[in-house]
Amino acid sequence: MIRLENKMEVYAEKIKLWEQSVSSKLEHKMEVYAEKVKLWEESVSSSLNKVTEAMKQTETFVDSMRGAHLLDQTRFNNSFVEVKDQTKSFVDSMRDAHLQAQTQFNNSFNEVKKQTETFVDSMRNAHLQDQTRFNDSFLIVKKQTETFVDSIRDAHLLDQTRFNDSFLEVKKQTEAFVESMRDEHLQDQARFNDSFMEVKKQTERCIESMRNAHLQDQTRFNESFLETIDRFKMQSEKETEFNKRQVNPLLDSFSSKIQELSEAERKRDSTTKLSLRQEQNRFNKSFDKIAEDFQVRFNKSLQEIDLKQKKVALTACATGSTVPGGTVVHFPTIQTNIGITNLSAYKSTGKFVCTVAGLYHVSAVMMSNTDGQYYYIYKNSGRMITTYYGKVYHYQTRTRVFVTMLDVGDEITVRTEGSQLIYQYSCFTIVKLN
């Protein structure tokens, strides 16, 4: 009995030490867990990525706590079973040796067993309470995390709505500006066509008047020439008749002279006709040259008018990727394409190459989540626009618009200064105004 009591005291001491050890371990682990939860709650407010990491760490910690508890429970059960087996073997041996003390031993053993069961039940209840408190605190943290994620999502949707509204506003302003420029261009085109038709009519009237004046001069010259010939013939006939009546011997000489004069008149008439024909040819050549030059200038004016009236417009967006520093940003998603002949080259290089000279409206709407970065808009090798994102909390949107004259072959590009994430909402727009 003394040995049994000593063993029970040792067993009770072991159980007490085990309880203290388990309690200290639980308290230490709960303190560590509380510290980790506190740090986790502080890191939740910084970013959603840290929240996810903290949740993973929390789950890992919970799994480790659950494993440690199961391990402690297993060791407790094993030690309890071992003690129980030892007690049972000791009771069996004592039953054979001490039959008289069986009743007292059984009572003592049952008492110890009841105390042990009571202690085990109390430990189990304490563990269940700790588990319940842990589950409640974990659910509270989970709800707070979900609330924070919902608030972040709502803020993102609100910012996206504001961005869409501002983008639509800029688009409407651009369309209104393009429409006004188109109306002004149509008015200028109408005035140019009216003035061109007026000049054409004046030129035709001038050419017609010159032709009529030339024909009138030609007619007057022919009439005066014929009249001179007739007068000369009449005078010659009168003089011939007079000389015939007065001086018959000189008739033959006068007749020969008249024939010579007639031959000279015929020669002069042919020479005059040749000169008139040459003059007519020179006039025709000059008129043809004037008409050809006028036709060339007219065709050139029509080509310039056609080029001015040709529409060119492009809106393209990014795909959402990290762009290295100092490189051209590509916008392969085409939203609008009017008059772009080298679209495949633009999608592969990100370079807009001008094929129709004129006045162009250029804009770039860029969205990024990279702090302290720049993006630039270049015309050929010259920087036209510099844009700074500033401090970025979740993402930042920057818009730049300008107007410039482009010649055939000029290039427009959007470039980064440093490596930065470009969202798929980033878009590039260029429109020919005139």
Image: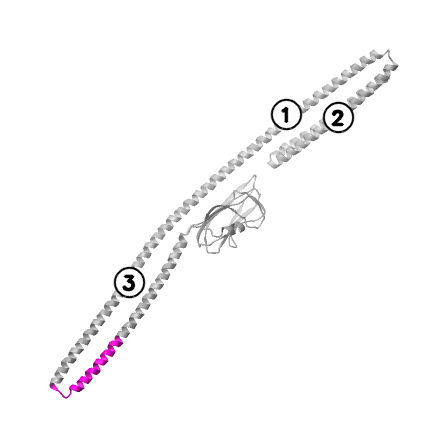
Q: Position of residue 103 (x, y in %)?
A: 83, 11
Q: Is residue 129 above or below residue 273?
A: above
Q: Residue at x 32, y 56 (%)?
A: 195
Q: Is residue 209 above or below residue 133?
A: below
Q: Is residue 364 visible?
A: no
Q: Nearer the viewer, residue 194 or 242?
A: 242
Q: Is residue 202 above or below residue 41?
A: below
Which amino acid lies under the numbered mark 1 shown in the image of this protein?
A: Asp
Secondary structure state at the residue bearing disc 3: helix
Secondary structure state at the residue bearing disc 1: helix
Q: What distance separates the C-alpha of mark 3 from that of mark 1? A: 103 Å
Mark 3–mark 1 CB contact (< 8 Å): no
Q: Nearer the viewer, residue 105 or 380?
A: 105
Which amino acid lies under the numbered mark 2 shown in the image of this protein?
A: Thr
Q: Which residue carries the number 3 mark? A: 206
**Marks 3, 2: nearer the viewer:** 2
Q: Residue at x 69, y 30 (%)?
A: 63
Q: What's drawn in magenta, residue-wise?
A: 246-272
Which amino acid lies under the numbered mark 3 shown in the image of this protein?
A: Cys
As drawn, the residue found furthest toward the left would be 245
Q: Residue at x 76, y 26 (%)?
A: 75
Q: Which residue carries the number 2 mark? A: 74
**Marks 2, 1: nearer the viewer:** 2
Q: Quadrant of residue 257?
A: bottom left
- Is 329 displayed left or right of 59 in the figure? left
Could you tell which of marks 3 and 1 lies nearer the N-terminus? Answer: 1
Which quadrant of the rendered structure holds the N terminus?
top right
